[in-house]
Amino acid sequence: TEPLLSIRDLRTVFHTDEGLVRAVDGVSFDVDRGETVCLVGESGSGKTVTGESITRLIRMPPGEIAGGEIVFDGRDLTTLSEDELRALRGDRIAHVFQNPQGALNPVYTVGWQIVEAIQLHQDVSRSEARSRGIDLLDRVGIPEATRRFDDYPHEFSGGMKQRVSLAMALATNPDLLIADEPTTALDVTIQNQILDLLRELQAEFDMSILLITHDLGVVAEVADRVVVMYAGKVMERGDVFDLFERPSHPYTRALLDCLPGRGDGGASSIGGKLPSPTDPPDGCRFHPRCEYAVDACREGDQPPACAVDGDEDHVVSCVHYEPGGDPSIVRDEEAM
Ligand code: SF4
């Protein structure tokens, strides 16, 4: 069956005073129905812009989708008009952001906003929308949902606000939820509650989730598949178990080494800095920070996506995996 979302060679650029920023530069991946795909990378990797490009939430100008396809349920979203996209946004594709404040209007009660969201996309009566809204608040774990329905956003705590914004996003029963760092601002206990909740709701609503995060701990909790991004490019892509068992790209390995209990005892971050957005290095974008870099890494373009051990669903962009290369150079070090 066709994936729900299929992104091919997506290129999103920003025209800035400092020059052209290729924030997303040839990114490809799929999201199947009912699965969770995690986009991971440090800030500046292009993961957020990728998520925002899907429903064209990027600011245009200075942003622009310069190429590629975003096929959602058989339609290429890059060819839709702004009106057609608006109809899709908040209906079949919903977004949740790190800061729930942005999703909620402080002037109106949360109930009013949920009812509006439902009625904007569905032909139901106000009382029907209201009872569905109360049910949703209850589903996302707001105690005394009926009473709290008519409260204003500022009357909810941070974690509760994020639940409310999740209820708003789910109001139209979307096929795809794009969640960008939805738990990053919350403390660990609430973070875990929200992640559990996402999983429950995913099964209940049979929706696909694209979760954008810098946190591999979160990825391990919720992902079916993972896309690792660096400086606008996909470095590695694969099933979550493969990726944690056989991390194959030096960047993925470095990210995993930063997790407590893995690698050399938990370095908190990778050495070196992200490359300049306006002037990225030639060759592999990771080469200035890569301990396995050879001359071939420093010229030409990013290496093509190569299958790991013949598995076409697990690919890396690294010269050592190209035909004739020797992946053991990268992987032997930690072989068990
Ligand atoms: Fe490192 Fe070269 Fe592989 Fe890039 S292509 S990850 S620089 S070894």
Image (spheres, rainbow, N blue to C red):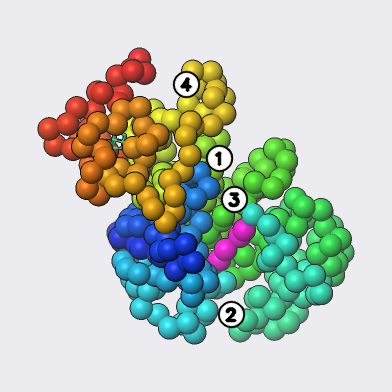
Is 179 left, or right, of 74 in this rendering? right
Residue 275 in picture, x, y percent from top left: 43, 45
**Disc assigned to residue 263:** 4
Q: Is residue 226 magenta?
A: no
Quadrant in the picture for the C terminus: top left
Neighbourhood count class around disc 2 (C-alpha, 10 Å): few under 14, some 14–19, many 20 upward: some
Q: Secondary structure at mark 1?
A: loop
- Above-or-below relation of 135 to 84: above
Residue 335 in picture, x, y percent from top left: 33, 17
Q: Label 1 amino acid?
A: Asp
Q: Label 3 amino acid?
A: Glu
**Disc assigned to residue 291:** none
Residue 219: tell me if it is visible: yes
- The answer to whether marks 2 and 1 mark residues whose Cβ atoms lie closer than 8 Å is no
Towards the viewer: 103 or 200 = 103
Q: Quadrant of ligand 1?
A: top left
Q: CA distance from mark 4 to mark 3?
A: 25 Å
Residue carrying label 1: 215
**Disc assigned to residue 181:** 3
- The answer to whether marks 2 and 4 mark residues whose Cβ atoms lie closer than 8 Å is no
Q: CA distance from mark 1 to mark 3?
A: 9 Å
Is 283 left, or right, of 111 in this rendering? left
Is 40 left, or right, of 129 in this rendering? left
Q: Point out the stretch of residues depicted in magenta.
A: 92-97
At 53% from the left and 48% from the top, the residue drawn is 43
- Residue mark closest to the camera, 2 vs 4: 4
